[in-house]
Amino acid sequence: MKEKHFFYLIGSVSFMAWILYFLLYSSLYSNREIIEALVFVSVVVLVYFIITVIYFRS
């Protein structure tokens, strides 16, 4: 597996794990907290993918 694909896999799996976590434990959190956390995780994963793309372009 190439490094680039490995880093994409890490980002994808971690994002899906967060979504799965909040689906499974949604009773522990309010809707506002879940939405806030998912927006935060989405932004962080987007930044991760942007950095990964920039790294492998150079």
Image (spheres, grey):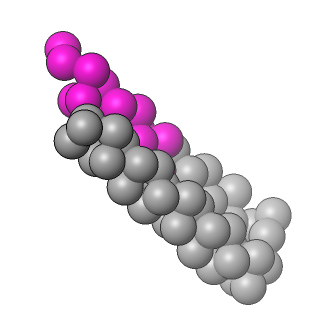
Q: Quadrant of residue 2?
A: top left
Which residue shows up at 76% across the image and 76% down it? Answer: 33
Report the number of numbered marks: 0
- Choose between 20 and 5: the one closer to the eye: 5
Q: Residue at point 27% right, 21% down?
A: 3
Q: Residue furthest bottom?
A: 32
User: Considering depth in this image, is 56 or 44 the residue closer to the camera?
Assistant: 56
| Residue with the most extreme top position | 1
> For the magenta stretch, what is the residue range?
1-16
Task: Please determine whether, in this image, residue 44 is positioned above or below residue 16.
Answer: below
Q: Quadrant of the N terminus?
A: top left
Report the front residue among 56 and 17. Answer: 56
Q: Quadrant of residue 22?
A: bottom right
Q: Inspect this view and state whether residue 55 appears.
A: yes
| Residue 31 position (above or below residue 55) | below
Give the side of residue 23 with respect to residue 32, left or right.
left
Q: Is residue 31 left or right of residue 52?
A: right
Residue 24 placed where, x, y %?
61, 54
User: In which quarter of the view is residue 11 placed?
Assistant: top left
- Residue 49 seen in this snapshot: no
Query: Residue 31: x and y, percent?
Result: 70, 82
In front here: 27 or 18? 18
Q: Is residue 19 magenta?
A: no
Q: Residue furthest toward the front?
A: 58
* Rendering coords of residue 39 (x, y %): 58, 74
Magenta stretch prevailing secondary structure: helix
**Does residue 28 lie above or below 6 as drawn?**
below
Q: Quadrant of the C terminus?
A: top left
Q: Residue at x 35, y 31 (%)?
A: 7
Percent x, y of residue 52 = 36, 42
Q: 3 left or right of 46?
A: left
Magenta-drawn stretch contains 13: yes
